[in-house]
């Protein structure tokens, strides 16, 4: 959406929009012209319908254009707000005119939307700025101290995607818990059918910047690591300088193996399963939710993250688990519904959500719904489960797409009403053309028994 607030009405907006040029063929104007032709009435005498809501806002003009990827709409509204009181002081909001253009469809619709906003800005000497709905609850959480995450770098995203592989992640966690591993011992951390892939995994981890590699010199007498050095060349220089093993043997005569340990990036991504948050931030960003509309709070000593997103004015809370989401997790997560009051709650797990956890949510939300809204279908939040990271993208598309679809329905419903005529202008056109008798017979005074 793009929007500008004006102090006064735009004159001749209908004429301007009808002459935007090739590529902008008005849909609603064409529909009205067809109706006028069928009715045999003068189109110039017919006024488009104005749509008023219950809050003093009236749509004075609307139009739609078919473009690549969907629809682009334009709408001019007038907001005549009522007087209101703050304490004993009465105030009246200034009357406002608002011009909005919006796109509905795939991501391809963004370019024609921007082109239309730029064209209108040039011809009307205005600036239509990006506009979105916002969640008041999200703003409250920011005021309480939560902060948006920074946008993850390309290296962080690539490394997080590598860690999404369960076997690679298991190896990385083994390296972290041991403080470093010999490459020859990596295979022992894997199932038997995957042990031959240990070397390749180590190379992938190093290429992604998650681990660093050193040569370790192992004493043949004590089997202890006596020296760690970056490269074979460095080891040879050390030997030339007279460096020996603790047992007195030259370091080149001792066994040397490659060892790997976590880098700062690796520790950061594994801490509290931050890599899952990185994937979430990246996927939401792909769907148009910028990091400044997300919040991340670390809890329980860093073992758990609370992730929030403002999706077009709806607060969403995410629970990320690198394991099965169990009944115990359900109790903990459910306690947050009343605290944060999200419109949507999403469980993202690398494995699956236990049936007992799902049953708990079904019962808890059903009871809560009946307590708060007896006899109604309302509830405080909607639960969605994303089981397995292969389903992360499609699950988020379903969630975000559902919210955007609701917004699109609201916008299009208002605009499509502009395809109709104002009733009074139709009656006046009919009267002036001699097609209707202006006399009115009051209800209840029609002759009884007259079927005409």
Image: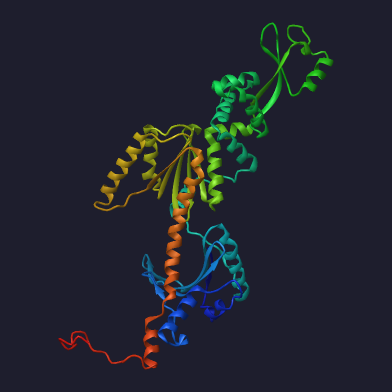
Q: Does the image show residue 145? A: no
Identify the coloring: rainbow
Tell me the quadrant of the picture where the C terminus can be found: bottom left
Q: Return the residue nearer the eye: 101 or 368.
A: 101
Choose between 302 and 353: the one closer to the eye: 353
307 shown above or below 288 = above
Q: Position of residue 205 (x, y in %)?
A: 64, 31
Identity of the residue drawn at 17% across and 89% down: 447
In the drawing, does residue 399 fall left or right of residue 158?
left
Residue sitting at 47 percent across and 86 percent down?
44
Q: Position of residue 361 (x, y in %)?
A: 34, 40
User: Outermost residue, right direction?
Assistant: 240
Q: Name the residue located 71 percent from the left edge and 23 percent from the top edge.
A: 214
The residue sitting at 39% across, 73% down in the picture is 52
In the rendered image, the vertical position of residue 304 relative to residue 344, given as above or below: above
Image-based side of 439 in relation to 406, left or right: left
Locate residue 295, reporting x and y percent: 51, 46
Between 65 and 1, the residue placed more toward the observer is 65
Q: Position of residue 283 (x, y in %)?
A: 54, 46
Q: In the image shown, does 54 or 393 lie closer to the viewer?
A: 393
Q: How many marks?
A: 0
Give the quarter of the image for residue 169: top right
Q: Quadrant of residue 354?
A: top left
Residue 40 seen anywhere in this rendered image of the structure: yes
Direction left: furthest residue: 448
């Amino acid at each position: 959406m793009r929007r500008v607030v004006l102090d006064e009405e735009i004159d001749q907006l209908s004429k301007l929009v009808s002459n935007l040029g090739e590529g902008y063929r008005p849909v609603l104007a064409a529909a009205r012209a067809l109706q006028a032709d069928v009715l045999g009435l003068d189109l110039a005498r017919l006024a488009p319908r104005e749509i008023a809501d219950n809050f003093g806002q009236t749509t004075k003009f609307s139009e739609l254009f078919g473009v690549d990827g969907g629809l682009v709409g334009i709408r001019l509204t007038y907001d005549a707000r009522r007087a209101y009181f703050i304490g004993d002081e009465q105030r009246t909001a200034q009357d406002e005119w608002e011009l909005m253009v919006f796109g509905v469809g795939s991501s391809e619709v963004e370019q024609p939307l921007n082109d239309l906003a730029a064209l209108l800005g040039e011809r009307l000497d205005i600036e239509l700025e990006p506009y979105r709905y916002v969640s008041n609850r999200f703003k409250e959480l920011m005021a309480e101290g939560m902060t948006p995450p920074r946008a993850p770098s390309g290296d962080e995203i690539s490394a997080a995607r590598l860690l999404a592989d369960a076997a690679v992640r298991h190896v990385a966690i083994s390296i972290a818990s041991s403080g470093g591993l010999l490459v020859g011992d990596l295979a022992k951390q894997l199932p038997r059918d995957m042990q031959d892939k240990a070397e390749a995994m180590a190379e992938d981890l190093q290429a992604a910047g998650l681990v660093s590699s050193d040569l370790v010199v192992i004493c043949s007498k004590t089997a202890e690591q006596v020296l760690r050095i970056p490269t074979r060349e460095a080891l040879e220089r050390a030997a030339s300088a007279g460096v020996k093993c603790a047992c007195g043997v030259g370091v080149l005569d001792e066994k040397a193996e490659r060892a790997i340990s976590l880098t700062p990036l690796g520790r950061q991504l594994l801490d509290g399963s931050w890599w899952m948050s990185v994937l979430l931030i990246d996927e939401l960003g792909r769907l148009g939710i910028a990091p400044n509309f997300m919040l991340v709070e670390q809890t329980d000593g860093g073992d758990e993250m609370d992730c929030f997103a403002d999706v077009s004015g709806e607060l969403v809370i995410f629970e990320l688990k690198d394991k099965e989401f169990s009944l115990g997790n359900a109790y903990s997560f459910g306690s947050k519904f009343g605290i944060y009051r999200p419109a949507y709650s999403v469980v993202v797990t690398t494995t699956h959500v236990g049936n007992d956890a799902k049953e708990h949510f079904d019962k808890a939300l059903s009871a809560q719904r009946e307590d708060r809204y007896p006899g109604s279908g309302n509830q405080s939040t909607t639960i969605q489960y994303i089981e397995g990271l292969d389903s992360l993208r499609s699950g988020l598309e379903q969630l975000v797409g559902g919210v955007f679809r609701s917004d699109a329905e609201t916008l299009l419903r208002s605009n499509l009403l502009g395809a109709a005529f104002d009733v009074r202008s139709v009656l006046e056109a009919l009267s002036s053309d001699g097609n209707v008798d202006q006399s009115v017979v009051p209800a209840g005074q029609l002759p009884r028994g007259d079927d005409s």
